[in-house]
Image (tube, rainbow, N blue to C red):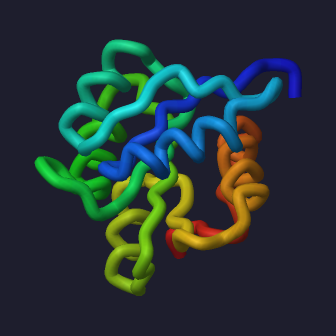
């Protein structure tokens, strides 16, 4: 891959966001911003135009799925990857319906999250967590 993936991290847990930034900010991925809720994520993403938004599902103000709906309706939407502690069939079905790239279970290895982020640039869904 020749270009750097521009990423926004979204989670209401600031410690987790800081840890994810340390792990994911690599030569291939540039973490360009962070947000603590879905509403702030939408504002930040519309301003900074990331390639990917990695977002927790359960958050205050606006949950990850509602924020994803707004972002994916934009003319030039980022790829959205949702993280959830409890992935179920309903979440996967709704995520697929609105065009979320992947739904990943919290607790998977960070290498799998990294792979899902990089897979967005190939235009193919990530096989580990595709909302299918």
Residue at image position (43%, 69%) is: 84
Q: How many marks?
A: 0
- Counting from the top left corner in percent of width and height, residue 56 is at 39, 56
- Counting from the top left corner in percent of width and height, residue 74 is at 31, 29
- Counting from the top left corner in percent of width and height, residue 97 is at 37, 63
Residue at image position (87%, 28%) is: 1
Apparent side of residue 24 relative to residue 81 in the rendered image (left or right): right
Query: Among all residues in the image, which is located at the extreme top?
Result: 47
Query: Among all residues in the image, which is located at the extreme bottom?
Result: 89
Q: Can residue 80 be seen here?
A: no
Apparent side of residue 106 relative to residue 69 in the rendered image (left or right): right
Place residue 39 in its image quadrant.
top left
Query: Among all residues in the image, which is located at the extreme left?
Result: 61
Q: 104 or 130, which is in the foreground?
A: 104
Q: 90 or 31, which is in the foreground?
A: 31
Residue 49 vs 66, above or below: the answer is above
Query: Among all residues in the image, which is located at the extreme right?
Result: 1
Residue 19 vs 57, above or below: the answer is above
Q: 79 or 64, which is in the foreground?
A: 64
Residue at image position (33%, 82%) is: 90
Place residue 63 in its image quadrant.
bottom left
Residue at image position (24%, 56%) is: 59
Q: Can residue 85 be seen here?
A: yes
- Counting from the top left corner in percent of width and height, residue 83 is at 47, 62
Apparent side of residue 86 relative to residue 26 in the rendered image (left or right): left
Apparent side of residue 50 relative to residue 39 in the rendered image (left or right): right
């Amino acid at each position: 891959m020749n270009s750097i993936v521009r990423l926004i991290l979204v989670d209401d847990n600031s410690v987790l966001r800081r840890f994810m930034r340390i792990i994911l900010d690599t030569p291939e991925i540039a973490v360009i911003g962070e947000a603590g809720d879905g509403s702030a994520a939408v504002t930040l993403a519309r301003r900074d135009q990331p390639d990917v938004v990695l977002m927790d599902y359960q958050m205050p103000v606006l949950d990850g799925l509602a924020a994803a709906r707004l972002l994916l309706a934009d003319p030039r939407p980022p790829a959205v990857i949702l993280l959830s502690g409890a992935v179920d069939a309903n979440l996967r079905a709704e995520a697929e319906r609105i065009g979320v790239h992947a739904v990943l279970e919290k607790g998977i290895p960070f290498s799998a999250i990294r792979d899902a982020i990089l897979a967005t640039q190939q235009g193919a869904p990530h096989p580990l967590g595709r909302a299918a």
